[in-house]
Image: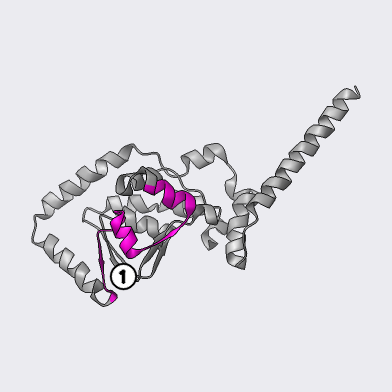
Amino acid sequence: MEWEKWGLREAFYNRYPHNRLVRLSRKPVIAMVQGYCLGGHNHWAYCCDFTIAADNAIFGQAGPRVSSPADGFFVPYLVKVVGAKRARELWMLCRRYTAQEACEMGLINKVVPLDRLEAEVDRWCEDMLQLSPGCLEILKAAFDQEMDGYADLGVISSMYYPDWFDMPEGKEGGAAFMQKRRPEFWDLRERERKMRQDLLDEYEKSEKGK
């Protein structure tokens, strides 16, 4: 949330989006997850080629909860991972899921006890080290080529709200999160509606007076 105060789009969307970094790697990338894996961390995990989690892991999205919109690659790619209904549920309800629930929906590959997490990741790495690295490189690129047609991050949000992070609603989520309070999204919308109505009433009154 601190990033959004000094320029999320420049630092996060434009320079270092998760999918770009993972896809630029010519090697398979494994996400090893323990504890909370929410928001941007969940992006990282499901953008990786494989995701292995400890049984104490918790997954979920948080964008609408903290007024941080996402579009482009992240959203349609999750549809490929878990299906359209589950992807919408994850993104639009901001619920949290246990590692077992995440595994059942296809968000991760495997769940293991916390004390076996590193050993399990090592085992997956050892399995791949027995295979042709050139073939793995080609396979990774072949899987990724489908995603090359997805829109870049921020395209849709820039069309709908070019100045989102400078708007009250865009600022409110981060401010509420840092202040540990409930965000007042709908109060802001109501105030905006009232201001628009007052402006319209004033305009109509002035037109009638001409």
Quadrant of the rendered image containing residue 120: bottom left
Quarter of the C terminus within the rendering: top right
Q: Position of residue 71 (x, y in %)?
A: 45, 44
Residue 58, how many percent across, how many down? 39, 65
> Does the stretch in magenta take in 95?
yes
Q: Is residue 204 shown in magenta?
A: no
Question: Quick one: SS at disc 1?
Answer: loop
Which residue is at a point 67% across and 46% down the rendered structure image?
189
Whether residue 10 is visible here, answered yes or no, is no
147 horizontally vs 156: left or right: left
How crowded is the residue under tag 1: few (<14 C-alpha within 10 Å), some, or many (20+)? many
Residue 119: where, in percent of width, then height?
20, 73
Toward the top, the furthest residue is: 210
Question: Which of the two residues, 96 or 115, is positioned nearer the viewer here?
Answer: 96
- Residue denoted by label 1: 55
Residue nearest the observer in this picture, 30 or 38:
38
- As displayed, is residue 179 above or below residue 8? below
Q: Which stretch appears magenta?
A: 86-114
Q: Picture quarter containing residue 118?
A: bottom left
> At 31% from the left edge and 40% from the top edge, which residue is drawn?
148
Residue occupying image coordinates x 30% and y 41%? 147
Numbered marks: total: 1
Tell me if residue 16 can be seen. Answer: yes
Residue 120 located left or right of residue 64: left
- Badge 1 amino acid: Asp
Furthest residue in direction right, as rendered: 209
Give whichever of 154, 102 is nearer the camera.
102
| Residue appearing at x 45%, y 57% in the figure | 95
Q: How is the image coloured?
A: one colour
Q: Is residue 156 left or right of residue 33?
A: right
